[in-house]
Image (cartoon, rainbow, N blue to C red):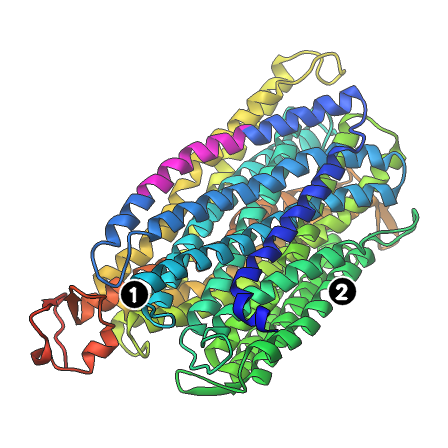
Amino acid sequence: MDFLHSNLIYIIPVFGLVGIVVMAFKSSWVSKQDPGDANMQELAGHIANGAMAFLKAEWRVLSYFVIIAGVLLAWSGTLSPSSSWVIAISFAIGAVTSAFAGYIGMNIATKANVRTTQAARTSLAKALKVSFTGGTVMGLGVAGLAVLGIGSLFIIFYNIYVINTGGDVNGLAMERALEVLAGFSLGAESIALFARVGGGIYTKAADVGADLVGKVEAGIPEDDVRNPATIADNVGDNVGDVAGMGADLFGSYVATILATMVLGREIVSEDNFGGIAPILLPMLIAGLGLIFSIIGASLVKVSNEKGNVQNALNLGNWTSIVLTAVASFFAVRWLLPDNMVIRGFEFSKTDTYMAILVGLIVGALMSIITEYYTAMSRRPVRSIVQQSITGHATNIIAGLAVGMESTVLPILVLASGIYGSYHFAGLYGVAIAAAGMMATTAMQLAIDAFGPIADNAGGIAEMSQLPEEVRGRTDNLDAVGNTTAATGKGFAIASAALTSLALFAAFVGVAGIDRIDIYKANVLAGLFIGGMIPFIFSALCISAVGRAAMDMVQEVRRQFKEIPGIMEYKAKPEYSRCVEISTKASIREMMLPGAIALTVPVIIGFCFGPEVLGGLLAGVTVSGVLMGMFQSNAGGAWDNAKKSFEKGVEINGQVYYKKSEPHKASVTGDTVGDPFKDTSGPSMNILIKLMSIVSLIIAPHLNLSEHEIVKTKNPPLKQQEFLKSSPKNATADHEIVLHGTNTLK
């Protein structure tokens, strides 16, 4: 035990290394599976090449952003004694790691898709094993990199600052180390936003073009090899739902741990770890959750063709959650002291564990509720199916109603979770609840990434004209994958809400304000502006999809018209033209939404002060959570309503299948829902977290702009300590500087 007490901080990154090692073994196993015949490999090669072409183009643009933002961060770090230029290095590491996390997922997905198709020629069990192992590689890669990255950077920068501050282990050294980690989180979330928005625009432009011209106008299947947009559509599944989601949850994972660590620093804790146990706890829980996700993933399997894929995924998921809950109990009992205080709120280690349980329960309930609103067999999707009989308009009305209704239960669960976790352990309770929810991110992401792999596998089976029984197996996996993708988005937005609240609390403390008074006109104005931002952000994303889809539709129509023999399989479509259209559109259109998220907090904060910025953050968090839930669930419900007709549904004694009029109405609904569920909806959780992180990073500058500070030849004095004394007591070693217009009272 003495060894663990002395070296826990160094053991945490080992959990990340374990995850990466297991990921490498599983990746190797997937690569060794049979990739099928030459035609299947050629189609998979087109998909892989298109996905890599997009990533290279995106990385080229984002490299300029990282360099410019890094220079600005380094410059800002020299403006005040409470900041450091080192944050720019951490920012660059976070950005590169986030991009790499997305690449890991996309690389394995483009290998697993064709191997899943080949496995489906044998059995459902083998197809599930290949596709889910591919998803597991992504989950373990993302979580492993996050735990290794944040754990290692904390060790490095904390020890550096301990030396620089003359052994101030729990004061200024910890403050500076956490500030640098905020840069790591900012880099991760920035890349996640661009990857999510850009990937979402790419995939939905291709999907809409393929559906409207191929399925509705030409009357051919969605993934027919004759459809010029089908390769771009399958590429989009990888760059949006795999690479984008990987970068997204990497950023969420890091931001959650960071927010809890920042609030943990405020806790008065007499523990056996030098007072930093509340800071170490979220990293330890993340590491344990990674190990238990590996165990849970090993249980996902079916034994025969009648096996229930959803139940297999649920078994693995619930196993990892329960094991994490049990292990967290012992971790909390071991690390934390009996009594702690944060901002005047007293709580115990038992209270802390109860807050973790609240987070796990909220995450589980959010997934269950989202599954209810998006699963094919449930009332909400059935209501859309039934209203499709009367046409396209009623299908749209039903889908919008389902999306709006679907916000009620999740918000009630989320509000209860916030209240309950705060009741047990104050603001630290809210943060540690989010950390508990995110602990099994590796498992959640494995389940989520499994869906696009299965979708691609079905596309390759269709394009390769394999027997119907093969497509039946891939459709089985794809139907479950659609639901798991929707539940993953619900999980992500719930975790983002709790994380943003924790980041918000950290911002208030760092900015030096004790309350945000909405009775003030300027604060109320900030609240309304914040509530508006998710709407304009969504409008930009959806409009971008619409413009790119128009280009795609025109290109597909052109090829059908100008290339003779496509419909008779005598000529191959120009797949590369459609891939090029999606790539250029996504890179061009992702810049403005990203700029809004990054610049608005800076403009509001420096022009109007931290309290108005706090109002802005409150508005964007509430509005963004609601918009994210509404759009993701509506889109998921529309999608599965369409798939219900593809399987065949009985309404009022009549059975409707593909190409029927109700099916065409459901295709329209799915087309409307595509940018909802895959572009603007899932981007909401990154938007609210990114704006909170930007605010947290500029908070020291906002604090300094409101008060007089001390510059000293020695290590900088804490502002709070200086404010307790009179400026008259300053010595010759100190320089009094007035920032802003306010004077000390």
Residue at the spot 34% in from the left edge and 53% down from the top edge: 87
Q: Say which element carries label 2.
A: helix
Pointer 1 or 2: first along the chain: 1
Whether tag 1 and tag 2 are in contact, CB under 8 A, the answer is no
The crowd level at tag 2 (other Cα within 10 Å; few <14, some 14-19, many 20+) is: some
Magenta segment's dominant SS is helix
The spot of residue 112 in percent (x, y) is: 72, 37
Q: Which residues are magenta?
A: 53-68
Asked whether residue 64 is drawn in magenta, I would say yes
Task: Spot the residue most to the front.
Answer: 2
The spot of residue 655 in percent (x, y) is: 86, 47
Q: Nearer the viewer, residue 244 or 722?
A: 722
Residue at the spot 19% in from the left edge and 77% down from the top edge: 722
Amino acid type, callout 2: Thr
Residue at the spot 53% in from the left edge and 51% down from the top edge: 248
Asked whether residue 203 is drawn in magenta, I would say no
Residue underneath mark 2: 319
Numbered mark located on residue 165 in the image: 1
Separation of disc 1 and disc 2 at Cα?
Answer: 45 Å
Q: Is residue 454 left or right of residue 51?
A: right
Residue at the spot 63% in from the left edge and 48% down from the top edge: 20
Q: Say which element carries label 1.
A: loop
In front of the other: label 1 or label 2? 1
Q: Is residue 715 left or right of residue 137?
A: left
The spot of residue 297 in percent (x, y) is: 75, 54
Q: Is residue 522 visible?
A: yes
Amino acid type, callout 1: Thr
